[in-house]
Amino acid sequence: MSSVPFVTLNNGVKMPQLGFGVWQVPDEQATVAVGQALEAGYRSIDTAALYRNEEGTGKALAASGLPREELFVTTKLGNGDHGYDSALRAFDASLANLALDYVDLYLIHWPMPLDDNYVDTWKAFEKIYAEGRAKAIGVSNFKPAHLRRLLEETEVVPAINQIELHPNFPQAESRAFHSAHDIVTEAWSPLGQGKELLQDPELARVAAKHGVSPAQAVLRWHLQLGNVVIPKSVTPARIKENIDVFGFDLDDTDMETLGGLDNGTRLGGDPDNVNSR
Ligand code: NDP
């Protein structure tokens, strides 16, 4: 079984650098897929209220029989639940859905600029954190300007910012901002959603050189940059393949080749324009 290294968050909490994402996995299927991921050695699971599979995820966690302290569970606040009181209520609902009494990481899913309420929302997160019901708190899809405001107006520095990041969209500016402020970068859609990126001929050359798949080479690129990654798959062979990335290293040239695939392609929304609930 692969052994996944840990990153240490700015509050000392240790998080597996590679985890399993469940966006777009229906609730019942999430129980199966998360069960397969735990069996394959993943210990970190990334869900969200918006994914409507917290319950299915929680069932797999319980059925695994793994000690709670070996698991790292992330969920996220839904976009319709910004605001101090709403966030507290939504967090209670997520814990109940997951059938847990704490999560390891709780994230604001999107900043929701038209609501302009993420500062108050973060104050609710600080309360949840102070109560020990989330071992770490962070954000997702925050640009440096959103983060700067949190840093200026609130107490707790986010442990993580989970953002869209892959070789076609490597987010150099955000990564530099995060490292300057001791915020870990977590990459969503790390495989570029399994689309054009994985067909890239230069990526194919790097992968062939190491005798690995394009997905494995991309995951290795993330890990060597220091990103936390959460690839998603509902295919058992790929679930295993995506965690089998600790037996080879990309060299500087490989890293440059993959870094050179930046073509500015965003697969998801621009956080400045996402305001839907
Ligand atoms: P990924 O980049 O993880 O790609 C997933 C896709 O790639 C699926 O279609 C999967 O197919 C395919 N795939 C997986 N492994 C392989 C492989 N080894 N070879 C070829 N194809 C493969 O995309 P996601 O968008 O799912 O991102 C990962 C996670 O990030 C999400 O599940 C979620 O947890 C998080 N996320 C967070 C967001 C946010 O706003 N905070 C937004 C989007 C995602 P199949 O399943 O059929 O095997």
Image (cartoon, helix red, strand yellow):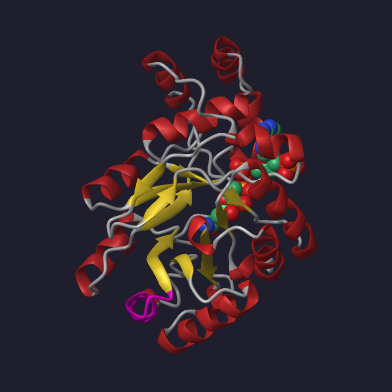
Between residues 40 and 27, which one lies in front from this camera angle? Answer: 40
Q: Residue furthest bottom?
A: 85
Magenta residues (range): 121-133
Whether residue 268 is visible here, answered yes or no, is: no
Whether residue 223 is visible here, answered yes or no, is: yes
Is residue 127 in the magenta section?
yes
Q: Residue at x 49, y 29 (%)?
A: 220
Quadrant, the C terminus: bottom right
Q: Residue at x 55, y 60 (%)?
A: 67
Q: Residue at x 68, y 69 (%)?
A: 52
- The vertical placement of 49 against 200, above or below, is below
Image region (quadrant) for ligand 1: top right
Between residues 140 and 92, which one lies in front from this camera angle? Answer: 92
List x then y, in percent, for residue 186. 44, 48
List x then y, in percent, for residue 261. 49, 26
Q: Is residue 53 left or right of residue 227?
A: right
Q: Quadrant of residue 98?
A: bottom right
Chief secondary structure of the magenta portion: helix
Quadrant, the N terminus: top right
List x then y, in percent, for residue 63. 71, 62
Q: Residue furthest right?
A: 28
- The vertical placement of 128 against 175, above or below, is below
